Amino acid sequence: MKRSDVDYVKFEARRLLQRIDELERMAGWYRYADGEDKSTSKPHPDDFFRPGQYTAAVRRARLDLAKALPRIR
């Protein structure tokens, strides 16, 4: 397994996570790493992301990650 392949997979995984964070922010979701602040967090009204440019970006990033993963099999 080459280091460049591992780096490429890490890059694509990081990109997918960034797209997911952006999707959640634009949809009004709040996520805290160290815990949840009950006074400022608001739950999303439903558990579904509507189709749009942010969901499309997540799908593209997921496909790119799926293409990168075989490089480290």
Image: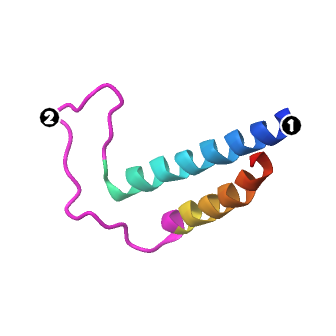
| Residue receiving disc 1 | 2
In the rendering, at what x and y percent does residue 51 appear? 44, 74
Give the magenta part as a residue range: 30-55
In the rendered structure, which amino acid carries the disc numbered 2? Answer: Lys
Magenta segment, prevailing SS (helix, strand or loop): loop
Give the mark toward the camera: 2 or 1: 1
In the rendering, at what x and y percent does residue 24 appear? 39, 52
Residue contact at pointers 2 and 1, CB within 8 angstroms: no
| Residue sitting nearer the eye, 9 or 44 | 9
User: Residue at 77% of width from left, 43% of height from top?
Assistant: 8
Q: Which mark is residue 45?
A: none
| Residue sitting nearer the eye, 72 or 58 | 72
In the rendering, at what x and y percent does residue 39 appear? 13, 34
Q: Secondary structure at mark 2?
A: loop
Instruction: Left or right? Give the position of 12 relative to 62.
Output: right
User: Residue at 19% of width from left, 62% of height from top?
Assistant: 45
Residue at the outermost front position? 73
In the rendering, at what x and y percent does residue 63 appear? 65, 64
User: Residue at 48% of width from left, 72% of height from top?
Assistant: 52
In the rendered structure, which amino acid carries the disc numbered 1? Answer: Lys
Instruction: Left or right? Give the position of 1 relative to 15.
Output: right
**Label 1 environment density (alpha carbons within 10 Å; few <14, some 14–19, many ≥20):** few
| Residue sitting nearer the eye, 41 or 72 | 72
Q: Secondary structure at mark 1?
A: loop
**Label 2 environment density (alpha carbons within 10 Å; few <14, some 14–19, many ≥20):** few
Picture quarter with the N terminus: top right
User: Residue at 32% of width from left, 25% of height from top?
Assistant: 34
Work out whether mark 2 precedes mark 1 in sequence or the reverse, and give the earlier one.
1
For marks 2 and 1, give the CA distance. Answer: 45 Å
Q: Which mark is residue 38?
A: 2
**For residue 50, above or below residue 40:** below
Q: Residue 36: which quarter of the image?
A: top left
